Image (tube, rainbow, N blue to C red):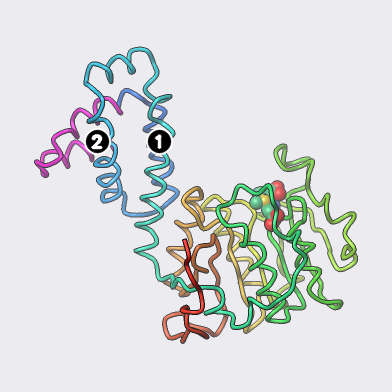
Amino acid sequence: MISTLSRLDNKKSGFILVGQFAEVLASSGDLVNRMERILTAMRTPSLLLAHAVASKCMLLLDRHPRARLEELYEQGNFEAEFGALFNRLLLELGFKKTLEASNIRELYAEEIFEGIGTVSLPLNISNEASHHDNHMDMMFVVAAAKLRSAKRIFEFGTYTGRTTCGLASIADDVKVFTLNLPPADDPRYGPYIGTLIKTSPYRDRVEQLFSDSRTFDTSAFASSMDYVFVDADHSYEGVKNDTLKAFEMLKPGGMVIWHDYAPKSPGVFGYLQELSHERPLFRIRNTCLVLYIDGVNPNDFTPKTNAGFLEDVS
Ligand SMILES: C[S@@+](CC[C@H](N)C(=O)[O-])C[C@H]1O[C@@H](n2cnc3c(N)ncnc32)[C@H](O)[C@@H]1O
């Protein structure tokens, strides 16, 4: 990346600070390695992205006197001062550019699913403590299943089972299969796996499966699911694996939804960019949800209603 930035400097005289930026950044091994890992996970053409990030970072560094930058480097504080900020810039720019390069059509939920706004659901499907930008995400995940009368649902990634129970609440005859790593194999989420399912009134409609999705055999579920929700390992390889398995299990006319299509998950948005050129996708506007509906091409799709029904009163 550093040599890329330096080359750009020779070509684009406007970026006079690239050399200075590259020199200081090069001194911070961790930061460079992390940026390179993020670029790899995105699978986007990194030259343009590196260029865009460099120019943003330079604007920032330009406000700092050279002596101050050297001082930060000598003290080993460069990463502490700029690392998180550069990372965030890289992810936000990467997300924006990846979306531009994708075949993903953004529409409001009501434009894709006419009547979704009138579906009634338990309020606790939404997690008040969630750090996600949009607390409506899981409401839409469950409401779409209910509106489409899904009967067999598969979820990759259980965690506490909040969404699982929401999905199980939609009808008496629904069956929800939810797959997670065995708790002992996941020190971070392990203690919480399925805790909400145990006390849910809908627990009899849920079957918990414990396996690493990378080794999970889908043959017992082949072409049998109305709906698959992908929300487990968010690395590029993880989401690719789970997606390929989701398609093995999907019935004709079924639907797949992915969560965490957001700047913080370069593996998710990087992989979905690639997939969207094979299978065009929708994104529910202002959410972290991307979806595929078998037999519906987003590019020819006529929105079900006019978005004018929504008012922005901010
Ligand atoms: C984001 S959480 C799932 C959230 C849940 N879908 C919800 O809506 O509340 C991700 C879960 O995926 C699980 N996971 C991560 N990698 C996995 C893998 N390779 N196979 C199966 N589960 C995995 C984690 O243990 C964690 O519980």
For label 1, the SS is: helix
Disc 2: CA contacts within 10 A as few (<14), some (14-19) or many (>=20): many
Q: Report the front residue among 193 and 145.
A: 145
For label 2, the SS is: helix
Residue 20, magenta (yes or no)? yes
Using residue 240 as the reference point, say whether residue 28 is left or right of it: left
What residue is at 67 percent from the left and 65 percent from the top? Answer: 139
What residue is at 47 percent from the left and 61 percent from the top? Answer: 314
The secondary structure that most of the magenta stretch takes on is helix
| Range of magenta residues | 1-25
Judging by the rendered image, the residue that carries numbered circle 1 is 85
Q: Are marks 1 and 2 in contact (CB under 8 Å)?
A: no
Using residue 155 as the reference point, say whether residue 12 is left or right of it: left
What residue is at 89 percent from the left and 54 percent from the top? Answer: 198
Disc 1: CA contacts within 10 A as few (<14), some (14-19) or many (>=20): some
Residue 241, magenta (yes or no)? no
Q: Earlier in the sequence, mark 1 or mark 2?
A: 2
Residue 77 place in picture, x, y as percent: 39, 19
Q: Report the front residue among 300 and 226.
A: 300
Judging by the rendered image, the residue that carries numbered circle 2 is 58
Q: Is mark 1 within 8 Å of ligand 1?
A: no
C-alpha separation, residue under disc 1 versus residue under disc 2: 12 Å
Location of residue 110 (image quadrant): bottom right
What residue is at 77 percent from the left and 56 percent from the top? Answer: 161
Q: Which mark is residue 190?
A: none
Q: Is mark 2 within 8 Å of ligand 1?
A: no
